[in-house]
Amino acid sequence: MRELIWANLRARPVRTALSVAAVSLQVFLLLFLMGLTDGIVKEWGERVRGIGADLLVQPPNSSVFLAFSSAVLPEDMAGKLRQVEGVEEVSPVLAVVNTNSLTMIYGIDYDTYSRLGTGFLFHQGGPFQDPHDVIIDDIKAASKNLKVGDTVELLNQPFRVSGIVEHGRGARYFIPLRTAQELLGVEKRVSMFWVKSTGDAEGVRQRFVQLLPRHSIRRMDEYLSLMVSDNLPEVRPFTRAIILVGLVITFLVVLLSMYTVVLERTREIGILKALGASRWDIVGLLVREALAIAVLGALVGVVASYGVKEILTSLRPTMNILITLRWLGWGIGLALLGCALGAVYPALRAAAADPVAALAYE
């Protein structure tokens, strides 16, 4: 039977290749898109950890995606937060996404932000010297081939690169807070406050909750635990849609392919049944043929995913694609499931064929 399966696949190379390509496309899309999502979330969590804060204060009902945080917090709230027992530093930040490149920009108060964690580690240049200066992390600077003194366009305005710093401080670009507020028309307003405690982060959080009961106040370890795609409600519908679309594509392609195969092999099926093959032998033969297509497609899809990952990350160092064993399992499992489901109806139809009618089929 094994030799018969591979012989059948080799006998129709074009159809086999198209079926394998369809399955591999499903596997590739799942691994690539979910790997890109997981990579972005993981890389963002690592950059947030590098800020060195202990607490994050946001407006009520704020998203964990900081780019979507509205600039509604009064900047002078920082003074009230600093007066809370156990607070060492409070840094107001205005987060915005650059529309040209969809890159996160932080409008910061340099003095307070640099006192969070270990501060900025400069590779070149130094702090802001002018309202239209920008500090860039080393990865973004390398990808854009930028150096100190160069001009970069952000928020439709030219900015001079004043410094290049070690990556992992939250955003890729940092501009003066006042400049960001003026460009966005949100004077004296910020998106969030990063807070460093003297040691008792939970105690400070409890005091903040009493002071600001409606606001979103998270410890950094709590925030970082959310930096998994499964924990983000905004990502779940996207994940389910990718899985469903991949399964449907595989099912339909294999269903059409195997149904056509059954029609073309009517005489062959009649011969097998005349030689004593049972209905379940016929069903097993066609299902195993479909599973062979699934295995080949999964292998091609996995290899293509890793190949595209290496190419894209070499071309764009800021892109992070994380292909995990979990999504590898999902990709291969969905390929096998889709192919098996797609082969069931054609296999049952073939098994129900009358051998005498099948042998007389022209």
Image (cartoon, grey):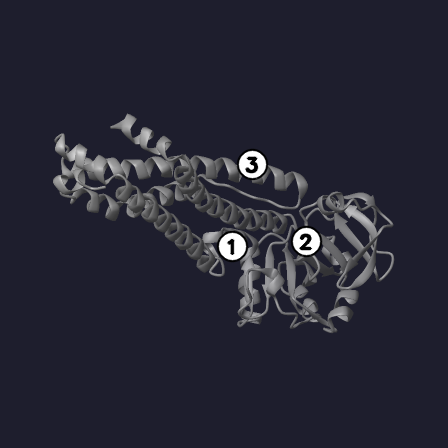
Q: Which mark is residue 171?
A: 2
Identify the mark nearer the N-term, 1 or 3: 1
Identity, as a three-letter code, of the amino acid under mark 2:
Ala
Identify the mark nearer the N-term, 1 or 2: 2
Residue annotated with mark 3: 307
Q: Using the image as rendered, state which of residue 176 and residue 199 is in the foreground.
A: 176
Mark 1 and mark 2: span between their CA atoms?
Answer: 20 Å
Identity, as a three-letter code, of the amino acid under mark 3:
Gly
Residue annotated with mark 1: 222
Residue 207 placed where, x, y %? 56, 65
Q: Please say if the residues under marks 1 and 2 sit with CB atoms less than 8 Å apart.
A: no
Mark 2 and mark 3: span between their CA atoms?
Answer: 28 Å
Identity, as a three-letter code, of the amino acid under mark 1:
Glu
Side of 161 relative to 92 (left or right) = right
Q: Please say if the residues under marks 1 and 3 sit with CB atoms less than 8 Å apart.
A: no
Instruction: Say what secondary structure mark 3 lies in.
Output: helix
Q: Quadrant of residue 130?
A: bottom right
